[in-house]
Image: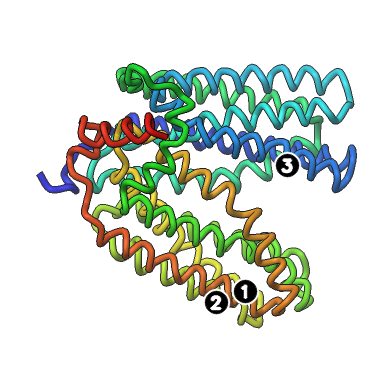
């Protein structure tokens, strides 16, 4: 059977991605509502505190949450984290209805970050269990498409809810979306099996498996480097440099929104195309050619002298990223030991979450030394190094049956874990 002919459980894939889309939409509703409320209560300091309260616990949790998923199973983890989020947001709605204090919002953001940190790797392990071969690329493209739609839908709803009502109403809405997502997870994960805990192991030992996986499997290591370089190259230009570029050329703040929407639109088109045709597009195109396109696009964005040209290039970069991202995830999932898939995906997620602050600090400091435009070009060069890492990954031996959780590969990690 050819890889493209391998099975895919479309009903469960669609149910899962639809529930993820609803949950992510709710996340953006909450993000906008919480951010605006924080600004009203305490200005820049309050919103910074709120952002850190949500991101730091999530990043720290990701260090060991993948091991928890591998040991206990995705179903066990997701049913508990999703139900806990629904209860947390319902309780938060009651608290914010009865008190105007800021600190309950910080507590909600911190606990939410922990729950998302536990749930993210578990969610990432589901699609490889529902689709195989090249069909997994289609499933990941569908998931990426939903990810792009969520902020477009959720952000305006969050703004409307907080503008016409109060924060507790937004929290109540998101609690409902979590409840719907919980029902979908219950259906989709039924019969997927439990975790793979070996006698004598514990979570502390397995929490280091992410690094050991990268050391043991060269294909995983180079894919991780590829994803890290792309996230590093994107962070500063999008978060800091784009607003500065627009302001310096006198185009107005609306131009930032135009470019971001163009990028999201390009990524959305790529997601649709990938869901339909990813299994027919050569992996080299999806992974290497698009990576080169992203690097060239980042370089070109710094040279554009009109909003239209900047948005057009942004759309092309989004199109490339919409094909490249799912390709990285797909190959990474296929190269990961099945019994350590949660741990592997937590490392990939951590690379994305933890890279943006690093990018802002590193390139922000560099721009103070060599200038704004020169730093933007450096980001483009960094992005161009990513497809080289991806090419190096593809040249590594493809994982055999033993890397899918059969004892040989497991024994390597168990032995390494016990000796660590």
Residue name at image x 31 percent, y 48 percent: 217
**In terms of secondary structure, where does tag 2 sit?**
helix
**CB atoms of marks 1 and 2 within 8 Å:** yes
Which of the 4 quarters of the picture holds residue 380? bottom right
Question: Which label's residue is closer to the chain start, 3 or 2?
Answer: 3
Which colouring convention does the figure follow?
rainbow
**CB atoms of marks 3 and 2 within 8 Å:** no
The residue pinned by badge 3 equals 51
* Vertical placement of residue 199 versus 308, above or below: above
The residue pinned by badge 2 equals 299
Going by the picture, which residue comes out furthest to the left? Answer: 1
The residue pinned by badge 1 equals 376
Residue 129 placement (x, y as % from top left): 30, 32
Question: Which label's residue is closer to the chain start, 1 or 3?
Answer: 3
* Vertical placement of residue 109 versus 197, above or below: below
- Towards the viewer: 58 or 15: 58
Residue 370 located left or right of residue 185: right
Residue 277 placement (x, y as % from top left): 29, 54
Residue 285 located left or right of residue 244: left
Residue 27 located left or right of residue 415: right
**In terms of secondary structure, where does tag 3 sit?**
helix
> CA–CA distance between discs 1 and 2?
7 Å
């Amino acid at each position: 059977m050819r890889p493209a002919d391998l099975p895919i459980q479309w009903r469960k894939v669609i149910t899962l991605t639809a529930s993820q889309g609803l949950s992510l939409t709710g996340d953006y509703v909450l993000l906008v509502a919480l951010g605006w409320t924080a600004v009203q209560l305490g200005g820049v300091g309050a919103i910074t505190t709120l952002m850190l309260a949500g991101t730091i616990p999530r990043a720290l949790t990701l260090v060991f949450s993948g091991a928890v998923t591998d040991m206990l199973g995705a179903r066990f983890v997701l049913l508990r984290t999703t139900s806990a989020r629904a209860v947390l947001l319902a309780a938060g709605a009651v608290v914010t209805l009865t008190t105007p204090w800021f600190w309950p919002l910080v507590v909600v953001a911190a606990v939410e970050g922990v729950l998302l940190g536990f749930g993210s790797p578990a969610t990432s392990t589901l699609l490889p269990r529902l689709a195989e071969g090249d069909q997994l690329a289609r499933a990941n493209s569908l998931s990426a498409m939903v990810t792009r739609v969520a902020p477009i839908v959720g952000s305006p709803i969050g703004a409307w809810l907080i503008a016409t009502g109060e924060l507790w109403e937004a929290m109540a809405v998101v609690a409902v979306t979590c409840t719907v997502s919980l029902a979908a997870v219950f259906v989709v994960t039924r019969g997927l099996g439990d975790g793979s805990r070996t006698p004598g192991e514990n979570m502390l030992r397995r929490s280091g498996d992410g690094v050991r996986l990268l050391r043991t499997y060269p294909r995983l290591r180079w894919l991780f480097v590829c994803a890290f370089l792309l996230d590093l190259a994107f962070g500063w230009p999008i978060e800091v440099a784009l607003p500065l570029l627009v302001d310096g050329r006198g185009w107005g703040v609306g131009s930032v929104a135009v470019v971001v929407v163009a990028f999201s639109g390009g990524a959305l088109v790529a997601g649709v195309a990938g869901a339909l045709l990813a299994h027919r597009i050569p992996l080299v195109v999806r992974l290497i050619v698009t990576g080169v396109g992203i690097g060239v696009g980042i370089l070109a964005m710094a040279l554009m002298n009109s909003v239209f040209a900047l948005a057009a290039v942004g759309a092309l970069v989004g199109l490339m990223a919409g094909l490249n991202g799912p390709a990285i995830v797909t190959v990474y999932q296929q190269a990961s030991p099945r019994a350590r898939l949660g741990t592997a995906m937590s490392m990939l997620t951590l690379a994305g979450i933890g890279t943006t602050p690093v990018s802002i600090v590193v390139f922000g400091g560099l721009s103070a030394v060599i200038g704004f435009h020169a730093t933007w070009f450096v980001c483009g060069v960094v992005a161009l190094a990513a497809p080289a890492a991806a090419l190096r990954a593809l040249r590594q031996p493809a994982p055999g049956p033993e890397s899918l959780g059969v004892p040989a590969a497991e024994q390597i990690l168990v032995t390494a874990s016990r000796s660590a």
